[in-house]
Image (cartoon, rainbow, N blue to C red):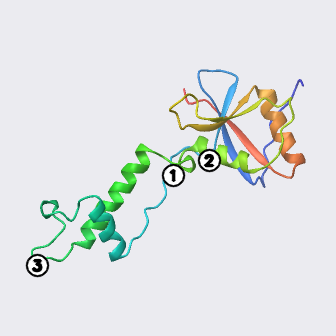
Amino acid sequence: MENLKLMEYEDAEESFYAVTYDSSEEFTLEEGDEFIYDEPDELDDEEITEWAKEYGYLDEDAGFVLEDGSIDFDSLRDCKIDHDKSWQEEYPPTSASPAGRAFIYFENLGVNYPKDIKISFVDGIHPGSDWQGVIVKGYDSLVSLQSFLLTKGFKVNFEIKNPD
């Protein structure tokens, strides 16, 4: 397997970073390099009122009920957006993280990988961890993965990245 080299397809369907941490020969695959959170749901007046009741925002001292007894829907919607963003940062969905998006992509391909490709799908590194990702052990396996995917009709680029 000497002289194996990653290809760079101009017309690749997908591109991933192959990130090495601590200068190891283990690559964590990542799609992009930033967290992307879901947009908060737009709620109508009835839905936002239900949400506000559930979380106590319509209590007298919460400040969202105006002097005339009407509800300050604009401020309440801003509060809901802040609440949703804070929740996602605390409990990000798999699709939010670069490693999670790679996990989803490779899991959804529905292929069986040959044994010579040392690839691992991690669904929680340890108990209590929700981290999901794809790890490829060794440069040769990364090159073999790219070649294998091409035989299955997927042009995928990998760019090696070391964040240190």
User: Residue 101 has which mark?
Assistant: 2
The amino acid on which the numbered mark 1 sits, given as a three-letter code, is Ile
Q: Residue furthest left?
A: 67
Q: Amino acid at mark 3?
A: Asp
- N-terminal label among 3 and 1: 1
Image quarter for residue 134? top right
Where is residue 127 drawn, in percent x and y?
Answer: 54, 29
Q: Earlier in the sequence, mark 1 or mark 2?
A: 1
Residue nearest the observer in this picture, 116 or 6: 116
Q: Where, quadrant-wise, is the C terminus in this rendering?
A: top right
Which residue is the site of mark 3? 68
Relative image position of residue 155 (x, y in whole percent) = 80, 50
Q: Residue 102, how many percent across, how many down?
A: 66, 44
> Depth check: 86 or 5 in front?
86
The type of residue carrying mark 2 is Arg
Q: Is residue 142 above or below residue 14?
A: above
Contact check, label 1 and label 2, Cβ < 8 Å? yes
Q: Is residue 9 left or right of residue 103?
A: right
Within 10 Å of disc 3 (Cα), the crowding (few <14, some 14-19, many 20+) is few
Q: Is residue 54 left or right of residue 105?
A: left
Q: Dividing the picture into quarters, in which one does residue 41 lie?
A: bottom left
Q: Residues within 10 Å of mark 1 (few under 14, many from 20)?
A: some
Query: First in sequence: mark 3 or mark 2?
Result: 3
Q: Which residue is mark 1?
A: 36
Mark 1 lies on a secondary structure that is: loop
Distance from Cα at disc 3 to Cα at disc 1:
40 Å
